[in-house]
Image (cartoon, rainbow, N blue to C red):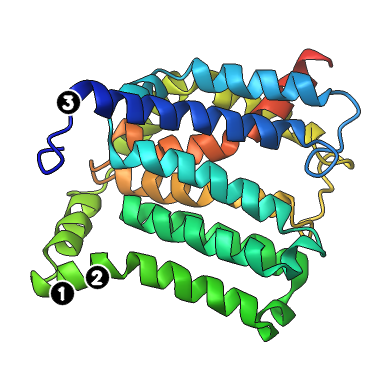
Amino acid sequence: RVRLTAPHCWLRLISEGMCVLTGLVRYAIAVSRQVLFPVAAASPAAAGLWAFGAYSLAPVLHVLGIGLLPDSLLMTLTAACLWQTLRMLDAVEVKRLRAWLLLGALLGLAGLAKYTAIFVALPVLACLLAAHGWRLFLRPAPWLALALAVAMVSPVFVWNAQHDWISFTYQLHHGAGSRWQWSTMAVFVLAQLLMYPLLAWGCIGLRRIWPGGGARRWTDPRLWLLVFFALPFGVLMYLSGGGSGLPHWTAPAWVALSPFAGVGLSALWNA
């Protein structure tokens, strides 16, 4: 902001625009029931509205909508990576070079936004492997996407190498916290449930998303999309036991869960 001498109002508009874009991407994912949510009990439009409503009623997300933080950018990029990964579960789409380059660009931007973008990259890998297997890497397109992402993120590593890795060192110490305690983690989880109420409640309806109730097929690549939420939330929840968890750190994870929560809430409403 200082280097660009941008007025505060423009910075607010950037974060608000990112928040709106995040909402639109999440809505698009939630309404794609024919691809992601084969649930007869919920209409795509209802799922999208519930996803948008659950997202809008989370207080922390409103703060990130007016304050330009790294998480504000990562929220949008997480939703975009989730959407692109969903599209690339298709056997035809995954063969297109432009799809891979777009995915690589999104991952590169996410890496520039915040270091925790690694929690976005790993679910992308897990979902695509579950859908297409290791033979996926026999093609040049995935490697080109990886090269693009690495090239875009390289300024972060170059700068840190020139400054004794100060940023990485700080983040590692900041994330580790102090003495780990169960009670501290419990407080963190309770705070999360209070700050993301409908998103958390929507998890109850997730059992209605895949036919078969408890006998879900873990080989279904669509189910692996939940790793976009489970991985970052699980890691941050554990780290919170050391007293290092901040409420907005989990915002990108909750954004990734919101399409699922929308379908879950819609299914519960129609139950």
Q: Are marks 3 and 1 in contact (CB under 8 Å)?
A: no
Q: Residues within 10 Å of mark 3 (few under 14, many from 20)?
A: few
State the SS at label 2: helix
Residue beneath disc 2: 157
Q: Residues within 10 Å of mark 1 (few under 14, many from 20)?
A: few
Q: Percent x, y for residue 27?
A: 65, 29
Residue beneath disc 1: 161
Q: Specify the amino acid type for callout 2.
A: Phe
- Alpha carbon distance from label 2 to label 3: 30 Å
Q: Quadrant of residue 54?
A: top right
Q: Quick one: 192 or 71, which is closer to the camera?
A: 71
Residue displayed at 83% across by 15% down = 270
Residue displayed at 20% across by 49% down = 177
Q: Are marks 1 and 2 in contact (CB under 8 Å)?
A: yes
Tell whether 102 sits left or right of 116. right
- Alpha carbon distance from label 3 to label 1: 32 Å
Rendered position, 193 above or below 36: above
Residue displayed at 38% across by 72% down = 151
Q: Quick one: 46 or 184, which is closer to the camera?
A: 46
Task: Check residue 7 in the rendering and tell me which mark sits there, or answer none.
Answer: 3
Q: Percent x, y for residue 248?
A: 34, 33
